[in-house]
Image: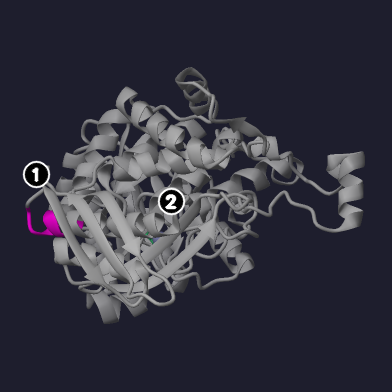
């Protein structure tokens, strides 16, 4: 058996299914480009039949990201498969990924179909997709709660029909690692034509020991984001296979030095902060508090670090630029950090950098990341925050006035009172944009140390049952709050425009 593990990244599909994580087309493209640099083998770019926005994003990624396989997810339904193909047909290496429920629980309560009917549909739909491309992946959804004998039968049928990868999803994160490893091993033993396909694993809570039992594709997401509790995390899998090479005897194509950058980008654009104690990419992953650990580290880092932070691309926390730095230095630093922005975006980010340098003495890599993320967030917005001003204090009524630039470039201004300055700003923005929504979460954090640090605000708003996340950064926390609200509202407006067929 080959000892190469295929890394299948589904940050843009299953990852985006995390509540509140909606990304716009440009943000998805940016993440896809970073996944390409990271060296993933397959990018699951989206679910084209699910929305016009998803279709467009998959199509753009298929056109622009040429090295990895670009995969589109689809139901086992001919019209949805046709739509998936339409989105990826220009990819250098297209893949269609068909899924259908396979457990009796799903069959009786959700699909209301018999095992025989699902078996037939699976075979027919793989054959249908095969008319478009050689590379077909098939997933029997909720496989870990399905009857194993039925899974063997369905896998044999779809491999006969042309499936080249068969994915085993633990859709609801139900089984233990041992049970999951056992299922993979039993598939190898009980599906006669299994050698004609790659076995893939898709776990929602953990990776288990499946790769040791014969799986050769792992489906995962950056930072482990995804439906409910999330998916297996790409960085943890890649580093486990690298650090414990002698145990797994498996390799991947991942350039681990790109991990940190990918993690930051996904966190900034989805609005999901990375928990400090998250393995590999959390803020504390390489911090040592106790005296004994610090003593060991000074003597030799390997005493308490099983990996060098530089091997995953964690930048040394050094001061990089300041007030006197020129555009050339700024551009160079951006390149060192791995950003490839358009000339216009660099000009704009440089202007923000200069404004920041006037307020903040020392500008770190983390500040630059925040500036770039702000640049990416605002590049495609419909309403742009042009001006915000508040008056507040212990003896005054919080009052805010705001000016936005609207979709047609018009100036839109209004003012409002609120319970506090942030409420007043949000009320004033609501008077202009006029889309009812409810603020469900608000948090603020300083991204670096010091009183002059940039404050980053993450909020979630809800409208018609859908959650939208917004993020904004500034040394002024009221401005950061206003930017975060605009970011969430712009996502809401874009989604509404897509649903109503205006975009
Ligand atoms: O978790 C799951 O079952 C999925 C499938 C669509 C592969 O995401
Ligand atoms: Zn999933």
Q: Earlier in the sequence, mark 1 or mark 2?
A: 1
Residue occupying the far top of the picture: 328
Please count the marks in the image.
2
Q: CA distance from mark 1 to mark 2?
A: 25 Å
For residue 449: magenta?
no
- Secondary structure beneath dot 1 equals loop
Disc ID at residue 133: none
Of 314 and 207, the residue lying toward us: 314
The residue range painted magenta reads 495-501
The image quadrant that residue 65 belongs to is top left
The image quadrant that residue 95 belongs to is top left
For residue 500: magenta?
yes
Q: Residue 247: image x %, image y %?
A: 74, 46
Q: Which residue is mark 2?
A: 473
Disc ID at residue 408: 1
**Which quarter of the frame holds ligand 2?**
bottom left
Of 168 and 23, the residue lying toward us: 23
Mark 2 crowd level (few <14, some 14–19, many ≥20, 10 Å Cα)? many
Q: Residue 405: image x %, image y %?
A: 17, 47
Q: Residue 54: image x %, image y %?
A: 23, 50
| Residue name at image x 33 percent, y 72 percent | 398
| Residue name at image x 16 percent, y 56 percent | 413
Q: Is residue 107 above or below residue 312?
A: below
Mark 1 crowd level (few <14, some 14–19, many ≥20, 10 Å Cα)? few
Residue occupying the far bottom of the picture: 109
Of 421 and 61, the residue lying toward us: 421
Q: Is residue 454 above or below residue 26?
A: below
In the image, taking residue 392 as reference, residue 315 lies left or right, namely right
Q: Residue 414: image x %, image y %?
A: 17, 61
Q: Quadrant of the N terminus?
A: top right
| Residue name at image x 60 percent, y 34 percent | 257
């Amino acid at each position: 058996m080959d000892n190469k593990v295929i890394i299948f990244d589904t940050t843009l599909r299953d990852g985006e299914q995390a509540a509140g994580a909606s990304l716009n087309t440009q943000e998805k493209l940016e993440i896809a480009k970073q996944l390409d640099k990271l060296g993933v083998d397959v990018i699951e770019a989206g679910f084209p039949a699910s929305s016009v926005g998803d279709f467009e994003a998959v199509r753009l990624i298929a056109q622009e990201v040429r090295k990895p396989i670009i995969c589109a997810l689809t139901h086992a339904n001919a019209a949805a498969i046709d739509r998936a193909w339409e989105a990826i047909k220009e990819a250098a290496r297209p893949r269609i990924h068909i899924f259908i429920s396979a457990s009796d629980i799903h069959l009786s309560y959700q699909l209301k179909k018999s095992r025989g009917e699902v078996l037939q549909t699976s075979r027919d739909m793989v054959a249908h997709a095969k008319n478009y491309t050689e590379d077909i992946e098939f997933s029997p959804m909720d496989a870990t709660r399905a009857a194993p004998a039925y899974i063997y039968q369905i896998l044999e049928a779809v491999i006969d029909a042309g499936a080249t990868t068969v994915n085993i999803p633990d859709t609801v994160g139900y089984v233990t690692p041992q049970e999951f490893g056992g299922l993979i091993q039993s598939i190898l033993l009980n599906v006669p034509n299994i050698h004609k396909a790659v076995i893939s694993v898709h776990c929602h809570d953990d990776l288990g020991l499946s790769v040791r039992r014969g799986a050769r594709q792992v489906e995962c997401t950056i930072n482990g984001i995804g439906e409910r509790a999330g998916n297996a995390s790409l960085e943890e899998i890649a580093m486990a296979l690298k650090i414990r090479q002698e145990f797994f005897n498996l390799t991947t194509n991942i350039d681990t030095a790109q991990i940190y950058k990918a993690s930051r980008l996904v966190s900034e654009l989805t609005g999901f902060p990375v928990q400090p104690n998250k393995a590999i990419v959390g803020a504390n992953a390489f911090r040592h508090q106790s005296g004994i650990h610090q003593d060991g580290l000074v003597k030799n880092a390997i005493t308490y670090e099983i990996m060098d932070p530089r091997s995953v691309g964690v930048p040394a926390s050094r001061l990089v630029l300041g007030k006197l730095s020129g555009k050339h230095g700024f551009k160079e630093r951006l390149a060192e950090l791995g950003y490839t922005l358009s000339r216009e975006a660099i000009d704009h980010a440089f202007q923000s950098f200069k404004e920041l340098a006037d307020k903040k003495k020392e500008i770190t890599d983390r500040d630059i990341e925040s500036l770039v993320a702000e640049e990416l967030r605002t590049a495609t917005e419909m309403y742009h925050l042009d001006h915000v001003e508040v008056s507040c204090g212990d003896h005054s009524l919080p009052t805010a006035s705001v000016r936005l630039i609207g979709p047609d470039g018009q100036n839109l201004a209004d003012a409002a009172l609120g319970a506090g300055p942030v409420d007043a700003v949000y009320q004033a923005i609501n008077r202009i944009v006029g889309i009812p929504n409810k603020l469900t979460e608000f948090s603020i954090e300083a991204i670096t140390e010091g009183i002059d640090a940039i404050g980053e605000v993450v909020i979630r708003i809800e409208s018609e049952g859908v959650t939208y996340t917004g993020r904004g950064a500034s040394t002024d926390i009221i401005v950061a709050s206003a930017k975060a609200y605009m970011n969430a509202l712009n996502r809401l407006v874009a989604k509404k425009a897509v649903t109503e067929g205006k975009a």
